[in-house]
Image (cartoon, rainbow, N blue to C red):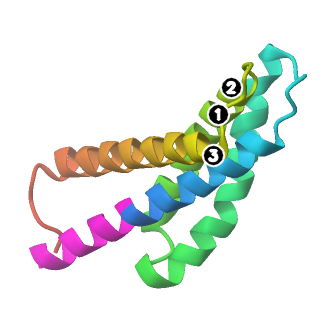
Amino acid sequence: MASSRIRYFLGDLVATTVACSSIAAFTGTCVPSDCPPWALMPLGMALGMALSIPCWLAAGPLLGMIEPMLQIMLGGMVAGMAAGMSAGHEPAPGLLALAALGAGCGAVTSLAIGASDWILRQGEADE
């Protein structure tokens, strides 16, 4: 039972990292450079949440519909916010830098949710 839990955890980690990388790259290129600084965070968050829906629907048949939803949607919101805020700076980051930023946001979000799940279960395996 523990080996299947590890496979799902790694699958969620990879799916969230890839989704957030794509979300950040797309969000960073869509945010206009003349956008006011106070609007960058909510604009990036909203765009990140909207873009996470197709990513979640693509990962759902492989990993289940509920489990990756939380990670991809939360990670997408964080990656969109970070990419939107960094895209507002001059010079704007490149596509590779935005993708790396999103991958980092996705990995950290997925690891934080996995650690929270482990703490809530107190280290016990699922039944």
Q: Which residue, given by chain and number where applicable, does mark 1 sit on?
A: 81
- Would residue 100 appear left or right of 30 to someone viewing this image? left
**Nearer the camera: disc 3 or disc 1:** 3
89 or 51, nearer to the observer: 89
Q: Secondary structure at mark 3?
A: helix
Residue 107 % position (x, y): 38, 48
Magenta segment boundaries in residue numbering: 1-13
Of callouts 3 and 1, the N-terminal one: 3
Q: Which residue, given by chain and number where applicable, does mark 2 sit on?
A: 85
Q: Residues within 10 Å of mark 2 (few under 14, many from 20)?
A: many
Q: Residue at x 85, y 27 (%)?
A: 33
Q: Residue at x 16, y 74 (%)?
A: 127
- Kind of residue sitting beneath label 3: Ala
Residue 24, label in figure = 3
Q: Secondary structure at mark 2?
A: helix
Residue 63, picture quadrant? bottom left
Q: Residue furthest bottom?
A: 61
